[in-house]
């Protein structure tokens, strides 16, 4: 079993709070993580109908089973339990009592914030990082990363990514989208998800996506919110600073797992990606995800952003470090080009507070240049760790 990078942070917070809550998309490995990290705690899965009925009908007696604490899986299935947990941990002021997991953030985070404010730490577990993939035996080849993504079961069980992601999509659409979003037109919703996958790395345009999907802009807004709440997609905000240029205000759209995005646009093998027109945006998606996962796993909570002006000056990622901003360009090409470095020089002149620059590219060698350090995608997290230090 692969030890997840978030484990040290998780254990540290468990010693500081009576409750720790781990959220994230389905199949990101929350249950495996928590049962492994807290093997000495009792375990209850609230997806189980009998367990859920017991917790709903007699919450005090249900919780009385666990005098030494417990891992309560899929807590969003019995949100009323949170109020009883609040009373319980207020009476017994020990830290390190309960670990909660939840797959749906649609309403869960706000409910936890109301019921357990000051009593729980919140963590977010996303699919495997590239280092975790590597430990599971997966290839660092760029096209394989983009094809198979990071959902743990694919790599732990040696599953065919196409079949596994097809099953994941059907399960997600049929269970979560209908339950948390009240979505009835599943055919239109599936079309909407595929259109989103075809727009990774682009500015969010709800009118355009809605029109192409055949739904209204308000419906497109609602559906995108459902996808975000379920940790299927996320929006990267633009950077705003006091400079005399017109800056883009719309966020950019990315998938939490690049493999799912690839599946949705019709990729069925790594070989297809070599000449696919969306290889560049998918590569960018993978790199942005790596930065997001690094931030969550190492308690950085960095406010990641991108920079774009109306006249075309752009930087794919601005990453906060202790000494300033790191400007990161993301390029899928395997050969370094001088124009990439020239673009970073313009960014340094334009954006105040840039302390370092990097290029994440599709090659396999790290090169330190005077303008920036160029690293392969598989080494991006290591570079971020150096920047954090």
Image: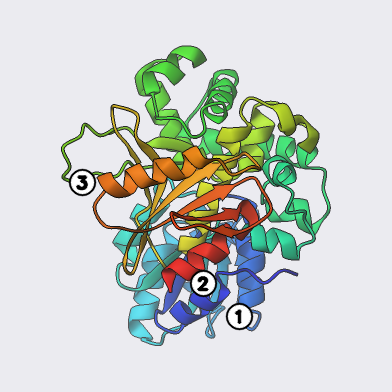
Crowdedness near tag 2: few (<14), some (14–19) or many (≥20) residues, C-alpha within 10 Å: many
Please identify the quarter of the rendering in which residue 160 is found.
top right
Residue 384, visible in the rendered structure: yes
Q: Which of pointers 2 and 3 lies earlier in the amino acid sequence?
A: 2
Q: Which residue is mark 2?
A: 99
Q: Which residue is mark 1?
A: 41
What separation in Å lies between label 3 and label 1 (alpha carbons)? Answer: 48 Å
What separation in Å lies between label 2 and label 3 (alpha carbons)? Answer: 40 Å
Residue in front for this viewpoint, 356 or 188: 356
Q: Which residue is mark 3?
A: 241
Residue in front for this viewpoint, 126 or 71: 126
Q: Nearer the viewer, mark 2 or mark 3?
A: 3
Q: Are marks 2 and 1 in contact (CB under 8 Å)?
A: yes
Q: Pinpoint residue 210: horizontal percent, then vertical percent.
A: 44, 18
Q: Is residue 116 above or below residue 264?
A: below
- Determine the secondary structure under disc 2: strand
């Amino acid at each position: 079993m692969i030890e997840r990078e978030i484990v040290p942070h998780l254990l540290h917070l468990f010693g500081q709070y009576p409750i720790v809550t781990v959220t994230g998309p389905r199949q990101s490995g929350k249950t495996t993580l928590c049962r492994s990290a807290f093997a000495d705690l009792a375990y209850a899965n609230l997806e189980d109908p009998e367990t859920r009925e017991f917790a709903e009908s007699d919450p005090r007696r249900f919780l009385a089973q666990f005098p030494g604490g417990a891992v309560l899986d899929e807590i969003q299935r019995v949100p009323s339990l949170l109020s009883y947990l609040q009373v319980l941990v207020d009476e017994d002021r020990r830290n390190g009592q309960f670990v909660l997991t939840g797959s749906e953030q649609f309403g869960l985070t706000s409910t936890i914030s109301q019921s357990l404010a000051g009593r729980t730490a919140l963590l977010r577990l996303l699919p495997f990082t590239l280092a975790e993939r590597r430990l599971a035996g997966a290839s660092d080849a760029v096209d394989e990363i983009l094809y198979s993504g990071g959902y743990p079961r694919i790599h732990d069980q040696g599953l065919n990514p196409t079949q596994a992601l097809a099953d994941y999509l059907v399960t997600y659409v049929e269970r979560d989208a209908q339950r948390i979003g009240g979505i009835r037109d599943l055919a239109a919703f599936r079309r909407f998800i595929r259109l989103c996958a075809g727009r990774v790395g682009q500015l969010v345009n709800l009118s355009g996506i809605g029109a192409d999907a055949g739904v209204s802009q308000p419906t497109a807004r609602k559906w995108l919110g459902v996808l975000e709440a379920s940790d299927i997609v996320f929006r990267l905000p633009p950077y705003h600073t006091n400079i005399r240029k017109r800056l883009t205000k719309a966020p950019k759209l990315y998938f939490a797992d690049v493999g799912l995005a690839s599946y949705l646009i019709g990729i069925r093998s790594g070989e297809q990606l070599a000449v696919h027109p969306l290889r560049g945006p998918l590569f960018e998606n993978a790199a942005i995800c790596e930065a997001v996962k690094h931030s969550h796993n190492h308690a950085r909570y960095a406010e990641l952003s991108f920079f774009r002006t109306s006249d075309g000056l752009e930087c794919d990622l601005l990453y906060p470090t202790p000494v300033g901003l790191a400007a990161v360009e993301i390029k899928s090409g395997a050969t370094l080009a001088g124009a990439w470095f020239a673009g970073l020089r313009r960014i340094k002149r334009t954006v105040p507070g840039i302390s370092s620059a990097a290029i994440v590219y599709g090659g396999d060698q790290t090169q330190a240049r005077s303008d920036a350090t160029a690293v392969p995608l598989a080494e991006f997290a290591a570079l971020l760790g150096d920047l954090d230090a």
